Amino acid sequence: RCNSLEEISISEAISEIPIGFAWDCENLRKVSIPESVISIKTQAFSHTGLLEVNLPESVMTIEKYAFSECDNLKIIHFPSDIISLGEGVCSNCDNLEEVYIPGSLSVIPKSGFSGCASLKKLTIEEGVEKIDYSCFSNCNLLEEVKIPNSVKDLGGYVFSDCENLRKVEIPALESWGGRDFSYCTNLSEVILAEGLVVIGNRSFEYTKGLKSIVIPSTVCGIGQYAFAYTG
């Protein structure tokens, strides 16, 4: 373990940051990543003490758990042209407050930001097509979500257990995994877009704050227990 390492400046000769590069360097506070880097591999900075991450525009792919369990991380800036994020990429970053997802990313990954207990602001740009399983579950300070019209698929449990989520706007999805908003106990405003065809199984189960909802005329199927145990 590298307990005394506090700062890393990566050489411009490097194009790929390898698997487990600084894993468990718990006192690492700052890393400088040059424009030469195009890929960050699995768990490269997991379990570090990073406070903020500014990624250069050259980075195209970030693999699974690359920044997971960085308890001090508050802000991470993804490049505007990034094309791939891996499973759990920033999961369980307890102090992460803000996430911006550019439209170049077609899929926001499974468990990508789950357990980010301090996440307050989430921006998802047009262009994203799928939000995968449990991506933002247990983000307890998140209050409002607008899912862009480009999103056609929610992978299941996407925003489950977001206890303070109060408002969500949902586009005309083509696939709905189920339980995507279950146990969002303070959810009180849900806006469903015209063109929506189906509401997934147990999608709003235990949303005890939900008193009313307008279901679009285009909906022709509602899943099992979709509104069970609501307000």
Image (cartoon, rainbow, N blue to C red):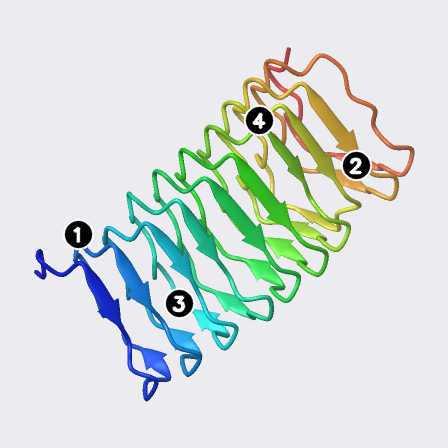
> Nearer the observer, disc 3 or disc 1?
1
Query: Which circle's residue, 2 or 3, is located before the other in the chain?
Result: 3
| Residue most extreme to the right | 217
Query: Which circle's residue, 2 or 4, is located before the other in the chain?
Result: 4
Q: Do residues under tags 4 and 1 come within 8 Å of each other at their CB atoms?
A: no
- Does residue 184 lie above or below 154 as drawn? above
Residue 1 % position (x, y): 8, 60
Cα distance between the residues tagged 3 and 4: 28 Å
Residue 213 % position (x, y): 78, 21
Q: Amino acid at mark 4?
A: Leu
Residue drawn 55% across the image and 38% down it: 121
Residue 165's label in the rendered image is 4
Q: Secondary structure at mark 4?
A: loop
Residue 86 % position (x, y): 44, 63
Q: Which residue is mark 2?
A: 221
Cα distance between the residues tagged 2 and 4: 25 Å
Cα distance between the residues tagged 3 and 1: 20 Å
Q: Secondary structure at mark 1?
A: loop
Q: Nearer the viewer, residue 204 or 192?
A: 192
Residue drawn 66% across the image and 22% down it: 227
Q: Residues within 10 Å of mark 1 (few under 14, many from 20)?
A: many
Residue drawn 55% across the image and 28% down it: 182
Q: Residues within 10 Å of mark 2 (few under 14, many from 20)?
A: few
Q: Which residue is mark 3?
A: 63
Q: Which residue is mark 1?
A: 26
